[in-house]
Image: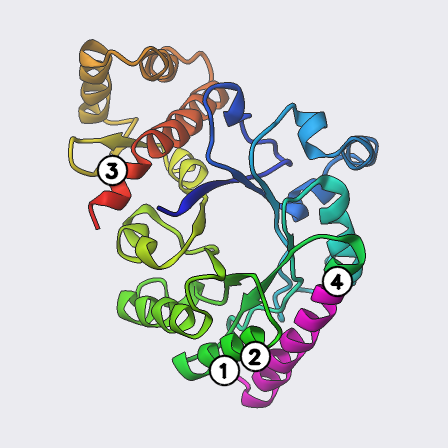
Amino acid sequence: MPRLYITWYAEPEDPHYWRFFRVGGITVSLKSLLKMPRWKFTRVLSQGFRRFFNYDGPLLVDSMLTEVHAPRSNMHGDIPQSHVLYLQYLLGSDILIQRDYPLIHVDDPGLRTKLFNRNLAMAEAALRFGDLVGKDVMLVVHGWNLNTYIKCAEYYRDLGVKYVGIGSLVPHRSNTKFLINVVKGVREVLGSHVHMHLFGISTIELITQLGNYVDSVDVSTPAIAGAKKELIVWDGSRLIRVKTTTVTGIKIMSELIERSSDELERKLLLGILNARSLRDKNLHTMIYNAYIITKYWNSVIDKQ
């Protein structure tokens, strides 16, 4: 059963889901932390994420992916990997995550190969940093076809990697067959003893097909669905999406309130229906979505 990490953004600040229910884990966006006011970010660094935000569960801090075509004016685009890893260390990430260059929208064969090799070199450097501070490091497997994903996984296997994440899959998120082949192929290379995490493309629909091959995933579905004014609802056999702004959606929420014996679920639904502002409604929707996904996570995976 893969552990569910909910993606969490500090700026603008997402709801503190852990204040309402027990989360499986959270993946914090480092880029969003760096957008905080300087005084606040300094306090988070000095106290650590858990103490500052009163959080006591599993924690990952991402590596702030650098897209090749990001503008040079991006103030965080050139932070060295050692600085990123040290920030993760200070924030209290359970595992440090390699800084990497995703092979997304890179069509030039020469540049693609250069970035592929750079990621391999950065992986070795990240492991050395982890040894220095006494922390495990998650290396990120990249590629642009099945063969290059396999080649990258073989390289990491020979380094003795304990944790890997799979990246550069966003352009292929609609190609389920390719995603399954990559995840299965990487798993076959690394074996069952290596912890494998799935980044970025972990929609609920995909998890039902990929969950058996990975040990953990992160999802941003609660926030994304909330922004689209969508509610994630368990219909008895699967998770479905319902528009909160339609007559049908309001009717479904009212029916859920009447028949649910879950006090938190009823409270959140009432908060959505009776919200006095759009912001309040969005916050309740995000919390509800995260709660329902967490509550029915085992059932979602069992449907595979």
Magenta part of the chain: 106-129
Eye-nearest disc, 4 or 1? 1
Please identify the residue farthest to the bottom as the structure is shown.
110
- In percent of width and height, residue 253 lies at 24, 19
> In whole angstroms, how far apart are the C-alphas of marks 2 and 1?
6 Å
Is residue 75 in view from this perspective? Answer: no
Q: Residues within 10 Å of mark 2 (few under 14, many from 20)?
A: some
Foreground disc of the pair 4, 3: 3
Q: Where residue 179 appears, x then y in whole percent?
A: 34, 67
Give amino acid for label 2. Tyr
Q: Residue 268 versus residue 134: which sits nearer the camera?
A: 134
- Element under disc 2: helix
Crowd around label 4: few <14 · some 14–19 · many ≥20 (10 Å)? many
Residue at (73, 36) in percent of width and height: 36
Residue at which label 3 appears? 299
Name the residue beneath numbered marker 1: 151
Specify whether residue 154 is in view: yes
Q: SS at mark 3?
A: helix
Q: Which mark is residue 155?
A: 2
Reading the chain from its start, which is encountered first: label 2 or label 3? 2
Q: Does residue 108 lie above or below 137 as drawn?
A: below
- Give left or right: position of 109 versus 296: right
Q: Is residue 111 magenta?
A: yes
Residue 157 vs residue 235, the one in the foreground: 157
Quarter of the figure with residue 245: top left
- Point out residue 284 in the picture as x, y percentages from the top left corner: 43, 21
Q: Which label's residue is closer to the chain start, 4 or 3?
A: 4
Spatial CA span between label 2 and label 4: 19 Å
